[in-house]
């Protein structure tokens, strides 16, 4: 660029503007128009003798610029291959330089008419300098080519080494995986061996204990063997004695057989006498039984009545409360009987009304003792007992238990159950027709009786009532249930 600028300074030293590219004509023309610094008119060249050197210089200068442009282009191409990271920057610079050289070439071709002999010498020197620079560039290019070859060789070597290292890395990874598997296997084997070792130690301890036990047992057996040998000798002596005793007993046996025959005769005689005495005894016993049966019957009746009176003395008059009856139930006028209907009645709303065919009594218990009886007759589905004032009046069958304020017994077909939580299956010898309910509020007791047989059916004990209690009935079929006055016991 410095050489080009010096050429421009020489061309413009006289203050003449450089011609534009459209005014340029080729160097091989016979005539050249030259614009003088003093006039804008065109005139012929001074001497045809000088046209030859100027033509040669112009051609040389054009060839030099073309060679220089080609060298720069080739050099930029090679540099681009060697340094990929600086490709775009180098390409831009080469293109800029090429454009500048093209512009300078055009300017030089346009301005060759103004060159003097001094300028030609300067151009000759510049041409020589350009040739020198070209040689230097060629040398640099050759060096770069050699360096590129070396770098390519090193790059190939690095690629080969990289491939080898990659293969070695893959092999190492494979060996690492194999070693890891072997390590895991060895760890598992170690755990199994440790477990086996512990088991063997445990078995060893057990075997040692068994050995010690066997040694002790051996000592005991040896002692027993010695004792048995001693006992054997004693038994042998006793056997000999028994053999002698057997002989003596055989003689005694023969004697006893003869005595047995005599005693058998006497036994037969006594049996005949016994039969006679037994007949007389039976006659006497029958007369005695007739005298004692009536007295025992009176005593049992007295005790039965006393036991029943201990409970029935607390009998209370009870009626059923219509405001609590389910709308499928019909009560008698005196409130003593309830019957289940198939059709639903339209009864006024009451918060105390039960669902599921139930009703409670009018009189409650908050202290003391109370007793009432219910006539169930032939009904095969009923419930009766007592309920807490705040009981769940919409509880289903499985929920009617003490947890919801119910202390009841129930019948369903031939099954009897106590409504505990969970329910208790009851075993009754006969189906009761009247059931008595006894409540001892202060003692926390609810008992149920077969009122006819006066047999205890079931008892809830330790009950904490806390609130007022009411009698309760459930009609599971269409047979009537009746509240009755307890029957007095007559002696």
Image: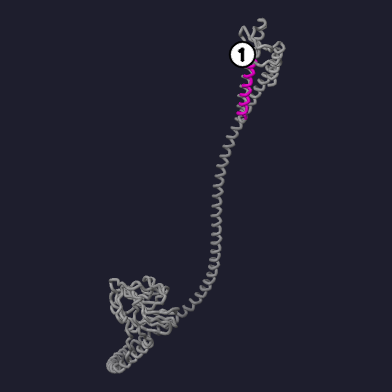
Question: Which image quarter: residue 308?
Answer: bottom left
Question: Which image quarter: residue 283?
Answer: bottom left
Check the picture and name the quadrant holding the N terminus.
Answer: top right
Asked if one can make out residue 18 in the rendered structure from this viewpoint, the answer is yes
Q: Does the magenta stretch include residue 424?
A: no
Residue furthest right as drawn: 118
Question: Which image quarter: residue 195?
Answer: bottom right
Q: Percent position (x, y) of residue 360?
A: 36, 78
Q: Percent position (x, y) of residue 420?
A: 40, 74
Q: Percent position (x, y) of residue 364?
A: 39, 81
Q: Is mark 1 on a helix, strand or loop?
A: loop
Front residue of 289 and 381: 381
Front residue of 362 and 424: 362
Could you tell whether 424 is left or right of 73 in the image?
left
Q: Is residue 95 magenta?
A: yes
Please determine whether, in this image, residue 474 is positioned above or below residue 195.
below
Q: Main secondary structure of the magenta part?
A: helix
Could you tell whether 124 is left or right of 200 in the image?
right
Q: What stretch is highlighted in magenta?
A: 86-108
Q: Percent position (x, y) of residue 277?
A: 29, 93
Residue at point 56%, 47% (across, down): 180
Q: Name the residue under label 1.
A: 24
Check the picture and name the quadrant holding the C terminus.
Answer: bottom left
Q: Colour scheme used in the picture?
A: one colour
Front residue of 91 and 103: 103
């Amino acid at each position: 660029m410095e050489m080009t600028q010096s050429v421009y300074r020489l061309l413009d030293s006289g203050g003449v503007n450089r011609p534009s590219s459209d005014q340029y004509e080729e160097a091989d023309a016979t005539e050249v128009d030259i614009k003088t610094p003093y006039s804008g008119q065109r005139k012929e060249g001074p001497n045809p003798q000088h046209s030859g050197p100027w033509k040669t210089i112009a051609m040389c200068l054009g060839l030099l610029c073309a060679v220089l442009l080609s060298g720069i282009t080739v050099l930029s191409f090679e540099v681009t291959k060697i340094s990929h990271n600086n490709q775009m920057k180098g390409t831009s610079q080469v293109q800029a330089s090429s454009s500048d050289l093209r512009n300078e070439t055009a300017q030089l071709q346009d301005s060759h008419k103004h060159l003097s002999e001094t300028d030609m010498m300067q151009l000759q020197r510049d041409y020589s300098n350009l040739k020198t620079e070209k040689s230097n560039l060629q040398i640099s290019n050759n060096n770069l080519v050699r360096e590129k070859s070396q770098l390519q060789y090193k790059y190939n070597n690095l690629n080969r080494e990289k491939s080898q290292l990659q293969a070695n890395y893959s092999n190492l990874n494979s060996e690492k995986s194999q070693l890891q598997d072997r390590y895991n296997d060895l760890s598992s084997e170690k755990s199994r061996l440790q477990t086996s070792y512990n088991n063997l130690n445990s078995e060893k301890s057990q075997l040692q204990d068994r050995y010690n036990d066997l040694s002790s047992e051996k000592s005991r057996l040896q002692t027993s063997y010695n004792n048995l040998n001693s006992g054997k000798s004693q038994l042998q002596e006793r056997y000999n004695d028994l053999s002698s005793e057997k002989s003596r007993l055989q003689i005694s046996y023969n004697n006893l057989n003869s005595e047995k025959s005599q005693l058998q005769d006497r036994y037969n005689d006594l049996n005949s006498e016994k039969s006679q005495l037994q007949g007389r005894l039976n006659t006497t016993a029958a007369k005695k039984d007739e005298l004692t049966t009536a007295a025992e019957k009176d005593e049992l009746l007295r005790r039965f009545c006393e036991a029943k009176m201990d409970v029935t003395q607390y009998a209370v008059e009870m009626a059923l409360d219509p405001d609590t009856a389910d709308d499928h139930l019909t009560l008698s006028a005196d409130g003593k009987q309830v019957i289940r209907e198939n059709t639903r009645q339209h009864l006024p709303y009451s918060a105390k009304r039960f669902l599921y065919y139930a009703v409670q009594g009018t009189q409650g218990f908050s202290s003391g003792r109370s007793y009432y009886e219910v006539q169930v007759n032939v009904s095969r589905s009923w419930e009766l007992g007592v309920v807490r004032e705040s009981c769940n009046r919409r509880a289903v069958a499985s929920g009617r238990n003490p947890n919801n304020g119910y202390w009841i017994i129930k019948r369903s077909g031939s099954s009897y159950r106590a409504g505990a939580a969970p329910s208790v299956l009851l075993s009754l010898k006969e189906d009761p027709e009247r059931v008595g309910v006894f409540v001892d509020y202060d003692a926390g007791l609810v008992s149920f009786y077969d009122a006819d047989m006066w047999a205890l059916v079931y008892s809830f004990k330790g009950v904490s009532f806390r609130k007022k209690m009411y009698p309760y009935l459930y009609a599971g079929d269409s047979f009537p249930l009746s509240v009755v006055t307890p029957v007095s016991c007559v002696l």
